[in-house]
Amino acid sequence: MRFIEGTDRGQVSLLPACVEDYVQPDALVRVVDAFVASLNLTELGFSRTVAAATGRPGFHPGDMLRLYIWGYLNQVRSSRHLERACVRDLEALWLLRRLDPDYRTIAAFRHDNPEAIVAASAAFIQFCRESGLITGRLLALDGTKMQAVASKKNIAGAERLARDLAHTEREIAYYLDRLDIIDEQVTEGSDDQPARRQAFSAAIASLGRRKDQLSRRQRELEKRDEKVLVFGEIEAKPMGYGRAPKFPAYNLQSVVDVDSGLIVHHDVANEANDSQLLHPMSLATMQVLEVDQLSVLADGGYSNAEAIAQCERDNVEVAAPIKRGAMNTDHFRPVQFAYDEASDTIRCPAGETLRPSGKHTRNRAIRYRTSACKTCRLKERCTPGAQRTIHRLFDQGALDRMEARIYADPSLMVTRRCTVEHPFGTIKRMSGGGRFLTRGLRRVKAEAALSVLAYNILHAANTFGADKLVPAG
């Protein structure tokens, strides 16, 4: 029995006569090529779309965009890796027609065209919408944390900076004392004296640079009036889940069409909390779909009463569970107090009526109290204090209506989870575990747009077929 043997490397063979024959007719790279060919790159904002009259000829931005989309589809995002792919990958050879730009040129394209790349990603969604692939009947919204380039060691606040600065100053003082001791205890014939002095002087110089850096960071922190900064990538913020260690990250938001599974709109924010992002993401999605009303599924992180009320005013119907904090189960919970909208009063479990007694402006809430607490027979089960106070948010009605939609159809949350979590998992797998390669919010948005565009092309080809993604003409 023999093993399968390969062909002798020196054997002459008849290979396909042209590069076109190396790529299958239904290959995804053909979709990428046809999609970029259909774009008006000048209108999208790409630079250098017209060749200069003088100087060395440059690469067409369409070819560079093709290379990046193909790279993100195949988990090749580094400019150096893309450079190597141009000369050894058959699909890349076919796509760029044997062009081989160097890594600096490849990296400069992504660096110089962030807004245009975002517009190109949006153009694919417009094409899918015009082709009838996106219904917009029901959408799911969610966010995920994507790690930034900066190291978590660069996260620092005023307390840590002061501690590090004091430690550095102590080290400098220590080495200065060592130098003084060397000067006082000069021993004739000692060969290591100059070497020790040189080592201590180098250490002092290094610590001095470290001290200057810490001082600059202190001034930067004071100037920005923030508690914590990520030095080296100021626009990134420490983010994480629960009590897990925080790392420099950005918040990637996506709105997914339930029927097609395509990401119809996305954005990148540097706010760790999702509660302020529901309204702007919903309005932006309405503009993308060109509709005047929207139905959105979200999780409890978006249950901000003020944002829900704003969405209602703008014809956005939100379905999400209310995020509730920890409650003392030894006493009656707020949900056990019934609100009467007609009289603007609250009835407690003992049957007493709580009336408005003031406002909490910062929390946007109204306080409700009753004087019957002093003699109430259920007081021990209600509050350990002298009087029970119930706070009702200004926009509590919008929250109640939103929660009622969940109770009416509990399967909505299952739909949300099955719709919006899959794209995040795929994008993180295609992006090396969910880490950006560029610094700054503008360029991170371009990276996110490439990831979303690659996902949408892949998902649309798998769902509807590659033939429907090739623009006519």
Image (cartoon, helix red, strand yellow):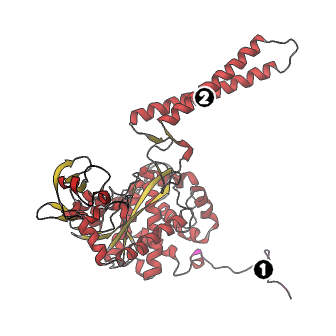
Q: Residue at x 81, y 18 (%)?
A: 193
Q: Which mark is residue 465?
A: none
Query: Residue 50 appears at what percent x and percent y?
Result: 40, 56
Q: Residue most toward the bottom?
A: 1
Left or right, 286 with reference to 454:
left
Whether the magenta-drawn stretch holds residue 2 is answered as: yes
**How packed is label 1: few (under 14 Cα within 10 Å), some, or many (20 or more)?**
few
Residue 316 lies in quadrant: bottom left
Residue 282 visible? The answer is: yes
Q: Mark 2 and mark 1: span between their CA atoms?
A: 64 Å
Name the spot of residue 119 as percent of width and height, x first: 37, 61
Residue at the spot of label 2: 168
Q: Position of residue 68 (x, y in %)?
A: 50, 62
For image coordinates 40% across by 73% down, the residue present is 262
Is residue 98 located in the magenta-colored stretch of the structure? no
**Label 2 sits on what residue type?**
Thr
Is residue 132 or residue 210 the one in the foreground?
210
User: 10 Å neighbourhood of mark 2: few (<14), some, or many (≥20)?
Assistant: some
Q: Nearer the viewer, residue 36 or 285?
A: 285
> In the image, which is nearer the foreground, mark 2 or mark 1?
2
Q: Which residues are magenta?
A: 1-19
Q: Secondary structure at mark 1?
A: loop
Q: Quadrant of the N terminus?
A: bottom right
N-terminal of the pair, mark 2 or mark 1, is 1
Residue 385 spot, x, y in % from top left: 30, 50
The residue at which mark 1 appears reads as 7
Q: What type of secondary structure mainly makes up the magenta span?
A: loop
Secondary structure of the residue carrying tag 2 is helix
Residue 47 visible to the viewer = no
Location of the C terminus (image quadrant):
bottom left
Contact? badges 2 and 1 (CB < 8 Å): no
Q: Tag 1: residue type? A: Thr
